[in-house]
Amino acid sequence: MVQAVKPPLADETGDPIVEMRGICRRFHGIAALTDVDFTAWPGEVHALVGENGAGKSTLMRILAGADAADQGTVICNGQTFSRHTSIRQHSSAGIATIYQELMIVDDMTAAANVFLGNPKTKGPFVVLGGMEDEFYRLCERLGVDIDPSSRAGSLSIAERQTLEIMRALATDCRVLVMDEPTAALGAAERENLYEIVGELRRTGVAVLYISHDLDEVLKLSDRVSVMRGGVLVANAPVADWNKRDLVAAIAGHEIETGKRKPAAELADEIALRVEGLEVPGKVAGVSFELRRGEIFGIAGLVGSGRSEILRALAGADPSASGSIEIAGRRQALPNSIRTAIRQGIVMVPEDRKAEGFVPLLDGTTNLWLTNLSEISKSGFVETSRARERAMAEGTAVGIDPANLGKAVQDLSGGNQQKVVIGKWLHMKPQILLLDEPTRGVDVGAREEIYSVIGQLVEQGLSVVLVSSELEEVLDYSDTVAILAGGQLRSIEPVSGQTVHDVLAKIFKVEEPQ
Amino acid sequence: MTGTDTNEMTAQQAQHGPRDRPWLRLAQNHAVTLMTFALVVGVATANPAFLSYLNLANMLSQWAPAGLMAIGMTYVVIAGGFDLSIAAIFSLTAVIAAIVAESLGAPAAFLAALCAGGLVGAINASLIAKLEINPFITTVGTGFIVTGVTFVVTGNASYFVTDPSFGVIGAGRLSGFPYSGMILIAVLVISAVALSKSVYGHQVYAVGGNPEASRLSGLNVPLILGSTYALLGALAGLAGYISASQLSSAQANMDPNILFDVLTIVIVGGTPLGGGIGSIWRTVVGLILIATISNGFVLLDISPSYQSIIKGSLIVGALALDSFLKRLR
């Protein structure tokens, strides 16, 4: 856990390391940032929160020199940057960024990745020994253990992320921007990252931390800035914030957060019985029952086999075996997506961007991709009917009709996810498999998504929910199953369980006996 | 995003959006079209014969084979594929058409060319879409095989067809309008409508735009991707027949440069490699651009040595202009 006692906040009367004043930026005439002032001091963890599209990433891209402001000044480490600067100039001033999409060359070694673009050389030759020494020094500083000669592609996401932090430190970075660094990490890996951030902070690095996980923000940071609609609406030391205030500031109005009330009594009718589900090397003999109108949450670490179970049930993994029983009828595991759809099972996949939607197609087409024949006649799509029906179906999942005509890649994370969920809901599925449904989704959209699902569950939809955020699993499920090493360790009603209980169960089974 | 946010954005867009600098938007979206138009006007001014009925009819007939293959290639590229074997299919089917025409007559030759092309396309399809071999390597390989087979079959000899009915589709005209041009226009219209309006067309865009998301949405990705290769193969067969019919002869090495013409037409027109984007009308623009350049050389009597310099510069120039305009803001 993160240390509760932090050293006193950096002296704000001292010189700030980053000063951004009056930053404005428009894209195609739409204001992305309006008159933003942002200041950060050395040795502070400064969290930046807000809905997707609030302008956090744009602001940080301008700071990193990856984008230029239309107006305003950027001062970092005493250097003032004009409009026409490059990432290279900004990085020589000590600014480094770790994006969500990691900039790692998979086929190079760990050490070569750390010194990418900045290798230790002697004349025209690369000095491998010198790089390894420096690599070990950086490992020691961060308290991690990575083999410098291992192939980067073989490392875990967390380790690859650590390589990027090491790369930043190797270039003597003073300001480190981290864009949702924990989004793809499991619980244990997150704790490791928090320690690394703490270490950076102690050595005087200003860490600018973008995150949607408000618990994490409150635990980790010294100062929190909130952005909304391209404006920096609030900025205060972390002591002045609580979760409720943060949510209100992000949304601009009070949102009732979380906690669906678990069904008092589950229906007797079993919607899906899974027996002996096996995925070679990933899942071993998983069996469970999903009742009609139940949300069945699966809690487990990344790599525990969560996604594999969902993929097998959705017919996306032909190597899986086992049997299922739907409405009393025993049948083989679906061997294709189409078979699963016929059985009434559909899945919202884990990686929205890679698996969820076709980025260049508009919302309407993406919505109907699952069933184009529904809006076509003798092989031709009836455009106006597609649009009208999409409006009706889209509104039901909270998609603004104005967004249906846009390419889905241009929508915010929350709206993208509504499209991905919506493209299944009009098929009237019996069983909905949700894999990380709110990753990269802002607070408001998340509430909307769960309120829609909550209504459908009351009408008899059954849901299997997987999320890395244990709070989310506990807040919305009726039943929680603990998954570790590809096996279900327990299945219990959610009521009374806390995050701590669940974490304890997950980690207990991982310890050697 | 809440409703108010969106309304705010549309309001701002209305104030500062496309209405801001409409000419820039137009130029950004249609750079190659504008350049093609300028070139057409330029060539027509320099030599008014360019726009004569006879010259246009000749151009249509001359570019029908490349145009037909460019249509198929547009489908393949939008679906995320690539095909380097079409020049080989083109020669093979031309030779098959000539041989079959001598023994069984023109209609059988037409059918044979179409089927042979479709068959090679289907082989490409199963290798690329089903076994998931890289399309670049696969089609280079099948291209070699097909070329080799064609040489073996012909023994490197030319085949001449004496039956006059064989020449009708390639060289025949109705009131001066070539049948081959009619076929090209008909296939263009049908394929454009099918690509933009049909269920199949939507699936082609989806598969090219994100194959994994398409698969998880229940689409039969190998079938949809594969069908575009088969379609391209069949169109290459049609092109092979037309070309053999135009010349009343065929040999193993019909026109090796036609591959580059086809790829240039598709890509310069604005259907980029990578999949998910593109359209038939963009390919039409590419076809007009390339045909105008080639025809302009003849009409303006430019020496062949300069032709390739100018052609290359115009192609690179069109793409550079397009890229430059897209960066402006």
Image (cartoon, rainbow, N blue to C red):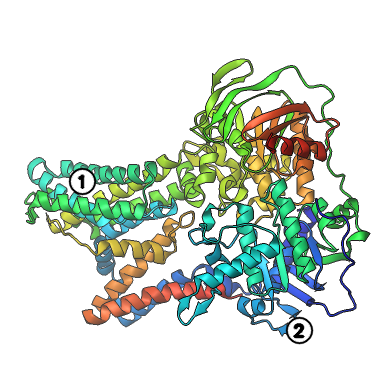
Residue drawn at x 26%, y 50% is B142
| Structural distance between the alpha carbons of marks 1 and 2 | 73 Å
A484 in relation to A158, above or below: above
Residue holding disc 2: A78
- The image quadrant that residue A20 belongs to is bottom right
Q: Label 2 neighbourhood size at 10 Å, few (<14), some (14-19), many (20+)?
A: few
Q: Among all residues in the image, which is located at the extreme right?
A: A240
Q: Residue at x 52, y 45 (%)?
A: B212
Residue A364 in the figure: left or right of residue B315: right
For the residue labelled by badge 2, is the local secondary structure a helix, a strand or a loop?
loop
Residue at 22% from the left image edge and 82% from the top image edge: B303
Q: Which one is in front, B74 or A183?
A: A183
Number of marks in the rendered image: 2
Q: Which residue is mark 1?
A: B113
- The quadrant where residue A473 appears: top right
Q: Is residue A12 left or right of residue A461?
A: right
Mark 2: which amino acid?
A: Gly
Above or below residue A285? Residue A216 is below
In depth, the one of A436 and A397 nearer the eye is A436
